[in-house]
Amino acid sequence: MSTPLPALEAIIDGSGIAPRIEALLPAGVRHRQLRVRTLLLGMLLTLDDRRPACLTGVHAALTALPGPDQARLAVTEDWGDGPHQLTYRQAEYTFRLVTKALGKDTPDGTPSAGLAAVLDDLLEATIPATDKDTSTALAVDWTDVESFSRPPHRGSTACADPEASWGHRNSNLPGPKGEMFFGYYLSAATMVREENGPPVRELTRRITLSSCHADPVRALTPVLARMPQQGIPLGDILADSGYAHRDPGAWALPLRAAGAQLVQDLHPHDRGPQGTYHGAIIANGNLYCPATPGKLLHLGPLPPAASRDDTAAHDQQTAELARHKLGRLTADDTDGYHRVTCPAAAGKLRCPLRPGSLTLDRSRPEILAPPEHPPGCCTQQTLTIPPDVAAKTRQKHDYPSAAHRRSYTRRTGAERGFSTIKDPASNTVTRGWCRLTGLAPLALWLAALHATRNQRILRAWDARQAEDQRRAAAGLPPMTRKRRRKTTLASLSSPP
């Protein structure tokens, strides 16, 4: 089932990008038959029909429309010698003008401001009004997009795609877990449900493309930071350790300033104790009592295949670790400062240095060996914490607590988003999917691909909801998804 033509036209018109791009194009001496709006519509039609991203597909999709639609979209025009149908050369000419207008005069592997605005507005137009406020949480990730061009094996690094470069990608196939590729990094932000909220349609809300020599984290950060300026508040941002491991100025600080709350995995190098502040131990983004047991400070995330007993034991340890965390008294002010107090003063544990805490019941942990020379975190009533303390690792939930684990599971929405554009049954983004070179052409095609991908998600969601309502009216239970059968090498080699 394909997207109706009026729905695709509504996306283009709702984005407002067609007249903006048209205004950037040079006014030639001769009349240009193919307008930008019709070109973008042809790109959406091509990808919605699961065809490769090529201009011959655009020409074929437009010339296959019914006659009245061709006349309305100027695919067919009356010339002096009679009706004239759009040619492939005209499609190629208009597309070249568009990509030149949206590209940079000196390409550096990142989108221009005009191209970035086009990507934002086109994808935002694919989000229905009923879905825009269903969730402010976004799952982010990046993936590889190969260029059709490649440099020679030896002698020169020049090729037909000078903006592309060599990058690294991970592989789940047997053998080496990583390999090199030549192309770009595609970063995407996918809508996911709020914590403890109902499921939402996982629509791609923002994308950006950057050359592999540019940091994909630094390329995505300004895209997300622009969203509040566009009237879209930021909520939870779910990211893996590849984002959290960057320096604070590249990721954490700009997003916090934009109002986002980070829920992210920590790189192994960022876990555990990372110094002190006025005697308090900095670990996993929080400040802890100097007498916190070292075993608790070195807790790692729970393995994916952990048993129930292991999970319960891990959750008990993280709960005990939270008792030793300095209690937060205030939210961040405009400059990012906040105040904390000793966990004993906050009533979370018993400590001889805080005589009042000894009246608490013995279900709370007790500090048996307080510091011989108490530091400032033990003697002062409160501490003022500047924004540069644990700036990189501070996040919404204590790491690696049960609350963090449950919240972080939503990040798989980003991986599901990439799986839909790399599905061999549809528009698989592999080498040769788009044979146009350069960042601007490829970014336009990828934005159009995500726009059509969002339409498929909307149709599939509506179909499931209709089926659930039909089954409920018939007194049947709702449909459940079949779990994928997991086959391991051990099970294949073991005798029956």
Image (cartoon, helix red, strand yellow):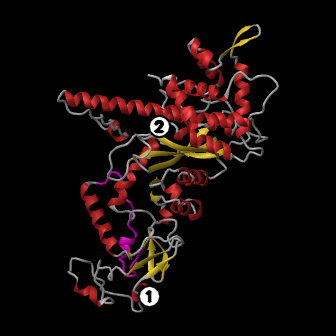
* Among numbered discs 1 and 2, the one appearing first in the sequence: 1
The C terminus lies in quadrant: top left
Can residue 297 be found in the magenta stretch? Answer: yes
* Residue 243 location (% of width, % of height): 53, 56
Identify the residue position indicated by label 2 in the image.
419
For the record, the magenta segment spans: 287-306
Q: Is residue 280 left or right of residue 67?
A: left
Q: Is residue 315 left or right of residue 177?
A: left
Q: CA distance from mark 1 to mark 2?
A: 52 Å
SS at circle 1? loop
* Residue 96 location (% of width, % of height): 73, 30
Q: Vertical placement of 446 versus 188: above or below?
A: above
* Residue 64 location (% of width, % of height): 58, 14
State the mark number for residue 375.
1
Q: Residue at x 59, y 47 (%)?
A: 168
* Residue 188 location (% of width, % of height): 53, 45
Q: Is residue 288 left or right of residue 308?
A: right
Can residue 64 be found in the magenta stretch? Answer: no
Determine crowd level at label 2: few under 14, some 14-19, many 20+ residues with C-alpha closer than 10 A: few
